[in-house]
Amino acid sequence: MTDKIFLIESDNFKSLLIGDKAMMFHGDTIETSDEFMNAWNKKITLSKRDDIKLSTIASITKNDDSRNIHVSYRNSVHIPDSYDFSFINDEDYEIFFTILEKKYFFNRSNERLSSLKSTQKNLLSLILAIALTIFCYYQATSIEKNGIDENESSKSKLFDKILKLLGDKGILLIGVLVIVYFLFKIWKRLNNPPMQLKLTQQNI
């Protein structure tokens, strides 16, 4: 086990300790390894705790244009899963990767992402934005003609009221702006795909 505590930003956790067999995540901000283990070993606590077994990790990646670290692993029922987090301190990125490479014998590589890999998420977001714009536009035109259905649930009526307020032209304007934004991100990545730092294990 290392003594280094990493302060992180994620959905549920604030501290990370790399143990002998797992990456251990805790919901409290903890400064030392002793404090971390004392908090980890508490039988009754309101703090969130979880771990990712090192033996289940398929890869750990970070793109040079992002602060996020992406961990791909197999969960407790052996289904592929993933978790993202970032470090509060910039110097912790290199320390984290070096520990896993030198102490836990992960293989380290750097590669420039292909055009497809570098734009995959943005392409999916673009398709979703187009589909959502089309749906909202036709929903708004229907509301304009037929009014809001009073038999709908309160959430559906609230959604329809927002669409009515925006109107078909407002929805198209917002939709076009979002679509242009994702097109710009795709164009930017196609012209300069990011480098990706990747850790893998030989036995996975």
Image (cartoon, grey):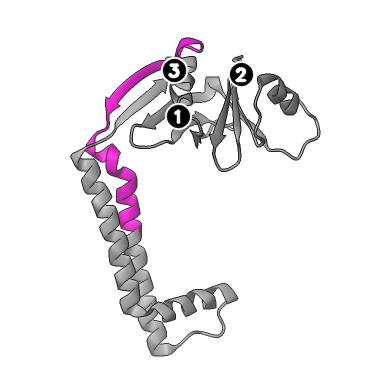
Q: CA distance from mark 2 to mark 1?
A: 21 Å
Q: Is residue 66 visible?
A: yes
- In this rendering, position of residue 11 left or right of residue 102: right
For badge 2, the amino acid type reads Gly
Please provide percent x and percent y for residue 55. 54, 19
Residue 201's label in the rendered image is: 3
- Residue 130: image quadrant is bottom left
For badge 3, the amino acid type reads Gln
Please provide percent x and percent y for residue 114. 24, 34
Marks 2 and 3 in Cβ contact (< 8 Å) = no
Residue 90's label in the rendered image is: 1
Q: Is residue 101 above or below residue 38?
A: above
Q: CA distance from mark 3 to mark 1?
A: 25 Å
Q: Secondary structure at mark 1?
A: loop
Residue 176 versus residue 114: which sits nearer the camera?
A: 176
Q: CA distance from mark 2 to mark 3?
A: 17 Å
Q: Is residue 76 visible?
A: no
Q: Secondary structure at mark 3?
A: loop
Please provide percent x and percent y for residue 146. 42, 89
Q: Is residue 167 above or below residue 7?
A: below
Q: Which residues are magenta?
A: 101-128
Residue 101 versus residue 36: which sits nearer the camera?
A: 36
Query: Which quarter of the figure is the N terminus placed in?
Result: top right
Q: Is residue 102 above or below residue 5?
A: above
Q: Is residue 124 magenta?
A: yes
Which residue is disc 2 drawn over?
Answer: 19
Residue at horizontal 78 percent and vertical 28 percent from the top: 42
Neighbourhood count class around disc 3 (C-alpha, 10 Å): few under 14, some 14–19, many 20 upward: some
Counting residues from the start of the chain, the first of labels 3 and 1 encountered is 1
Neighbourhood count class around disc 1 (C-alpha, 10 Å): few under 14, some 14–19, many 20 upward: few
For badge 1, the amino acid type reads Asp
Q: Is residue 29 magenta?
A: no
